[in-house]
Image (cartoon, coloured by chain):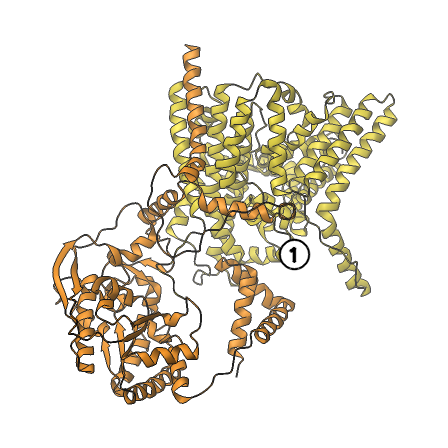
Amino acid sequence: MQSTNNTYKTGLLIFVLSLLCFPFIQSKFNIIKMPPLQGAYATPPKNARVNLADWLSGDYQAKKEDYLKNSFGFRDYLIRIHNQFEYSLYHKVNAKDVIVGKNNYLFEIHYIQGYYGTDFAGMDSINNSMGRLKFINDTLKKLGKSLLLIIAPSKAEFYPEYIPDNYKTPKTNTNYNSYLKQIKESGIDYIDFNGYFVENKNKSKYPLMPINGVHWSMYGVGLAGDSIVKYIEKERHIIMPQAVWKNIRIGKDEGFDVDMENAMNLILPLPSPPMAYPEIKFKKDSTKTRPNVLVVGDSYYWGLVAGYDIEHGFSRKSDFWYYYKKLEHGTVTRQQLKDEIAKEDVIIILATAHNWGDIGWGFIEDTYDLFKGIIPIPFDKEKYRQKLEYIKNVIRNDKNWYAKIVAGAKEKNISLDSALNANAAWMIEHTKQ
Amino acid sequence: MLQSSFSIFAKQETSYNLPKASIQQRIDMVFSSVLFLFYFLPAFFIAYYVAGKKFKNIVILIGSIAFYSWGAPRFIFVILGTTLLDFYIVRWMSSSETRTQKRLLLTISVMVNLGLLFYFKYSNFFIENVNRVLFHAFHLQGIQWTKLVLPLGISFYTFETITYVVDVYRGVHKPLTRFWDYQLYIILFPKLIAGPIIRYHEIADQISDRSANDTIDNRLIGFYRFILGLSKKVLIANQMAVVADAVFGSDYNQLDTYTAWVGILAYTFQIYFDFSGYSDMAIGLGKMMGFKFPENFNNPYISQSITEFWRRWHITLGNWMKNYLYIPLGGNRVKSKWRLYFNLWFVFLASGLWHGASWSFVFWGAYHGFFLVIEKGFMLNVYARLGKLLSTLITFFIAAVGWVFFRAEKLGDAFVYINRMFHVNTSPQSVQVLSTEFYSFFVLAIVFAFFAYFKQGQRIQDAVYFGEYNNKKHTFFVITSVVLLMFSVSFIASNGFNPFIYFRF
């Protein structure tokens, strides 16, 4: 009996030790296939290589631990377990800036800030941008080109009734209202999908905005795409290839309609009403005109690409500069901008309502300067670096200032050096005048 | 994992009064890290269980040296060097014929060990204070000094080294004959960094023969204990830390009364579940190897006096202080009442200073010493009249207020914080981290901290820690441990993972 007992207990011990080995085995051989984590996050750290100096300084150990923490077997699934636990029990979301609204409607907080105007850019900034836009529009017209401003819908404007009470603030001037008023007065061509979507919220056959996504629904994308094409046809006096709506499939939300849900990395799917998924394809027709279009815009354009196939409505020379390429290269050279504008027929600036606070992300200023013939002062990297270091030193020598930066870095969970750099850069930016 | 995420106790010890930027970032293979749980732990125990009886100590030695040198690669030479020196001094002392020579060698060994501890741990503090005096009294510039980094676990292993030399001197136990056995006692990784402080005579025989405790039952029970400690640390202490860090990281002058109290209560539970969780993990790992480590915590928050609190909190430190400081000072057997009070207070001042070199730790020790003295004087009688519930609440209240001195960076800050606790201010909450999630873990913390207050709770705890295990019970605990492990690791893995929906700026 004793020996049977011991065999059983030994079995249990082997089981628990094997269990502790599984993550290592899984990380090496990926035996059980699991869905990867979604959302945009930092590239996982690379494996560390050992050398004596790094070992003695502890750098190797820090890098190795960081690597293992980010790559051990079943990590993705364990993160999902944690996220599901926190969501199911506390409605806590572990995706940057995502919050749960009333009736489980998901929001990104920037949209709420945009709705209440807490991110208002100020009338000076708006007047400045609009003055430039007007000049760009007039210049493009003279060049035989068209400028089209598109205001994509904001979920907070569309579903304000589901904004959680603790995020509500008194409504003030918003970027959307202020820009819209001025755009209307300026005579620049525009499409206000935000207003259109809100107006048709209860009239539309299918939801125009999803519950679990941040962008327009795929059905909303279809309607928006048709409007854009019609507008360009009218403006350019052309007939573009026809966008054919083959079929509208009704089903559980997916793809772009669950982009926020995806970033939450849960185990169980979130509930949602049935959503409409039109199958839209541009008919190939060489007799029709595919205009050259430059789109400078935010992620809403991706919806048009994925759900409306809009790239097949535009020519192959067309381009999409996501946030004016700020995420890819950081800058667009004057020559690139000149060449790009020269080859396009239509220039679209597209952003969701709240993103108008920083509309163009530099495109408007650069194009204005280009058309005005203003040569910007060349950027002197070394001088900038010296300035940055000088201000960092000033901060370090100011006890109170330094303490604030240390506290800020801790709160934001960033390195002290990053915090110092950011603050020094801010100082340079704001003391230019 | 960086130092900042290490057990709260060691964090206090290593970074208490140095500007963070000036400390070389160090890593410790903490028990709650992925590296330890899924790489070191299985590899070590597979090697340990597969190794023949003769080689088990070698496996422990290699594992412990690897463990220590991972976190403190430069200091491994300090620990190896000092243990070598100690081993031979004690051997020499043991074979000495005369009492004078024995006493001389005892003094040399204690001085060397305490000297190292003072050098690494207190020289920064000492020089800072000397410089302050030089500047304020004489307007002198002060002594130039490069701030030192504290070797991992030095406070713990120094005390253990002292028990070795003193126990041998007192004839409580014979010295070890082989250096590597002594090295194993000092560097044994489960208890190396944060205790329990194991006195030499408590473990001496187990170093050469652990057959009595090295059973399959103990291996499994040790695993359960380890997971229990891990869960206490990850699922409770870390959740409390979020609020405690936010509150203690804020501007104390802006604190409203409610937040100040929530902050200190969160810290009260954080430090208990963190430190006792670490001790549980150490005891569990020891048990898995066949060692029997002394208990370090016994539900301290159910104590009915500060005297009792110190019999339940960090028990092994209390025992060390009693046997190696309080008794040599004369202990209770002194002629004058005032001498007794002095002894008590001195021990607690030393205990405070042991926790960290700053005036707030010293004050914390004095604060506890003060309550011990008045309890010896009359308070114990008062408690007896008040009954169990009131005495427990008062003791908990005293302990919680005391933690302010332990947690605040500076002594002056601690007084500002305490002022906010007792100066009623009902303005809106100044720190926005008090969520439903926090409160649910807070309730969990209360339940487990006071679990043994009731007889049934104590009975359940005894059954888990010390009861007999049949197959059914083992199966239940294996399942529970696996669930807790999975849950704990899911919290560890998620730490810092907070993706954007898509990249933008």
Across and down, in percent, residue A230 comes to: 16, 76
Chain letter tied to orange: A
Left or right for A78, reference A223:
right
Q: Name the image quarter holding residue B94.
A: top right
Palette colour of chain B: yellow
User: Can residue A105 be seen?
Assistant: no
Left or right for A357, reference A46:
left
User: Can residue A325 be seen?
Assistant: yes
Across and down, in percent, residue A60 comes to: 58, 47
Kindly give the residue lying farthest to the top in the view shown: A1
Q: Mark 1 sits on what residue?
A: B22
Q: Quadrant of the N terminus of chain A?
A: top left
Across and down, in percent, residue B252 comes to: 54, 60
**On screen, B86 above or below B264?**
above
Crowding at dot 1, Cα within 10 Å, few <14 / some 14-19 / many 20+, comes out as few
User: Given the image, on which type of amino acid does mark 1 rest?
Assistant: Ser
Which residue is located at x 44 percent, y 76 percent?
A333
The chain holding disc 1 is B
